[in-house]
Amino acid sequence: MQFIKDRGFSTPVAEGITARATFDQRRDFLRQLAGGSAGVGMALWSGRQALAQTAAPGKMRALPGARSTVAGAMTMEKSSSYADVTGYNNFYEFGTDKSDPARHAGRLKTQPWSVVVEGEVRKPGTWDIDALLKLSAMEERIYRMRCVEGWSMVIPWVGYSLAELIRRVEPTGNAKYLQFVTLADKAQMPGLRSSVLEWPYVEGLRMDEAMHPLTLLGFGLYGEILPNQNGAPVRLVVPWKYGFKSAKSIVRIRFVEAQPAASWNVALPSEYGFYSNVNPKVDHPRWSQATERRIGDDGLLARKRPTLMFNGYENQVGQLYAGMDLAKYF
Ligand code: MTE
């Protein structure tokens, strides 16, 4: 069923079996829609209409964090509204529509929860979520987030550098990469019925990327624990990479020697590379990455804003990729 998988982002997924001819027609139509800026605008607009405009923080348990002192961690840009941050999501385990995660993720049970740490470490083990929450002081970090689909948000996260956990588990000299494995539970996740991706959703980082202080192990946003649709109870946040690198609802972290599988890279290797650094000069094969629309701020008719190299974090992370051909390692 390769044709089910060969669609990628920006093309809604019909459930069930679709006749090949009908599917091809629809795909051509959707690709035209996704390719044109008006089409993207329309898709965003209809998605935004579905949001609950009244959403505000105050429903989840408080999780305060001290202002981060990590360089680059506190963008001065205005944060996106809580309604947009929690109502316009990608979390395909709950469906492919932007409003599906907010609608369906409520059923996800996030307590008890544990994260297995294994592979090339001297201290493998199982971390209970309460132990992870206490492992290091919580920080607030306001990150620009850029989705591969061409939109962006600014999100006030709460968490601490992933490096804090990495140091405690003592990686061996063979640990060159990390793989993040997320929950795949058919009983709780209706999206697993679709074969749009292989499950569980997995992601990967090179060790130096994972150790970078900006790489966040995220437990909250807007001063509260994460709503389920944003990846509760623990997720990755990597602000200089396209949003899909930021794996949600992590259950396992593997330290490995070889570059690990990452879901979108496995599904469509010609469109989504392992690195997936935000790069306005390297287009996605089906659309430009030179500009973006800020959800909530940039109206349908507003000029799109230019996308920044490494999403604006070039001073902090550029040296990680010195000498690499970023068109080849995209
Ligand atoms: N993690 C899991 N487990 N499943 C997913 O479908 N989607 C990714 C990423 N992490 C995804 C995931 C994509 S495509 C994006 S853009 C971000 O989560 C969205 O995070 P947000 O909804 O908190 O903005």
Image (cartoon, grey):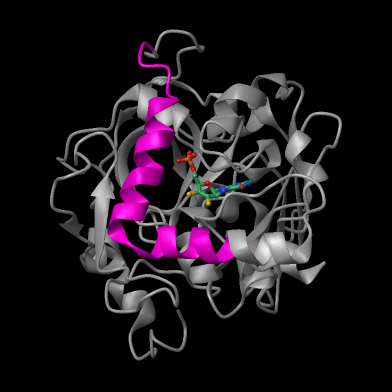
Look at the image and tell me whether residue 330 can be seen. Answer: yes
Residue 31: x and y, percent?
Answer: 49, 64
Left or right: 255, with 25 as reference point: right
Rendered-image quadrant of the N terminus: bottom right
Q: Classify residue 233 by image quadrant.
A: top right
Rendered-image quadrant of the C terminus: bottom left
Q: Nearer the viewer, residue 292 or 155?
A: 292
Q: Is residue 29 magenta?
A: yes
Residue 169: x and y, percent?
Answer: 66, 53
The segment highlighted magenta reads 27-54
Left or right: 211, with 78 as reference point: right
180 in relation to 231, above or below: below
Look at the image and tell me whether residue 151 can be seen. Answer: no
Residue positioned 42% across, 17% down in the render: 52
Residue 148: x and y, percent?
Answer: 42, 60
Main SS category, magenta section: helix
